[in-house]
Image (cartoon, rainbow, N blue to C red):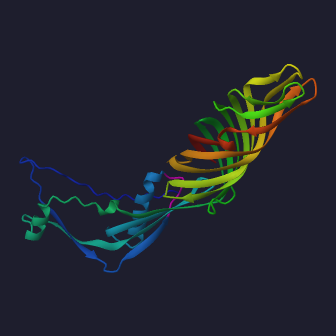
Amino acid sequence: MIGEIDHKAPSMNINTPEVLIKPVIADLDIIQEKKSVTYEADLELNPSEFKSNAKASFLKEHNCDVIINPHYLKTTKIENSNVVGVTYVVSGFPATFKKIYQTEKLEESVRDYNTMNVDVKREDFTALDKVGKKGSELYLSLAGGNYSGVELGYFSDITKGVYYFGSVETYTANEQINFDITDAKNGNTNQRSSAFNMSSFSLGAGYRLPLTKHMNSSIFGGLNVANMSFNNPVTGFVNKYRIEGFTTIGLRAGVQFDQDIYRNISWFGKGFANIHFLPMVNSSAEGDGFEVSNVTLPEGGQLINYALGLRFRF
């Protein structure tokens, strides 16, 4: 069942000598005590109707014609990134029309006010729009910068701000890796790799801290496994070995800022460092007698990464 209440407030702004309008004066009986009403919106209706329906609820509840100095407090409840409830608290002074009449001559106070160029629309004033979020949340992030990557994350309770994530990225690096090779023929020699491509996989956790209603900051960290593949493998002709790159196990730490764009879509910017430990050589050989040592990764083992991207919440 759907009930409708029409409340019309027509306005005319005619300022021509051909039209003569007799003013209509209304005397109001205003209740001196401020009243309020709580309206739970029907989410099946158009959201543009919520506020007018809240106003109609106030007029019906307090049996009045006009709300003097109305205030609208809106609360939106969100669970799992979905709006599950919208509540309006409308407050003001109820007023009823005591007498409506036309006059040939305006009173001086009314005439003086009518000549003022004052545009006051108090009914459009919203005291507060408060959003309450709870429940779990799943998100998918797509990023691009000095790397390309995908991240899947999960908030078990978004009111606490703690989340868990897994991510996969690919990089193109111009840095080189220094390392030593010891073999039976040449003894200890220093080698330098060509540029390399890197792919990594990370698991970790983070904490989201709200900055404003639609903007958040986050800190995060976790474990990282990275594979660095040389563009030109290092080879040895005597012992017939081929070093194709390194695999490392390390840590990840970074920060992120994100801002809502539309409903469950936001953009973000993030930066993080992969701190590499335990480099393991990826090699193949037909003979024995060579050893890799003193591996020096770029920037002391830390690769600073940055990207912009989009996040989709579910």
Please name the predominant secondary structure of the magenta segment in the image.
loop
* Residue at image coords 62%, 50%: 254
What range is drawn magenta here?
A: 40-45
Depicted 239 relative to depicted 226: above or below: above
Q: Is residue 266 visible?
A: no
Picture quarter containing residue 52?
A: bottom left
Picture quarter containing residue 198?
A: top right
Query: Farthest residue toward the top?
Result: 237
Query: Farthest residue toward the right?
Result: 287
Q: Is residue 259 left or right of residue 7?
A: right
* Residue at image coords 29%, 72%: 96
Q: Is residue 139 left or right of residue 228?
A: left
Depicted 23 relative to depicted 190: above or below: below
Q: Nearer the viewer, residue 284 or 227?
A: 284
Q: Position of residue 128 (x, y in %)?
A: 43, 64
Q: Position of residue 288 (x, y in %)?
A: 93, 28
* Residue at image coords 30%, 63%: 122
Depicted 140 relative to depicted 187: above or below: below
Q: Position of residue 70 (x, y in %)?
A: 34, 68
Depicted 143 relative to depicted 21: above or below: above
* Residue at image coords 76%, 31%: 190
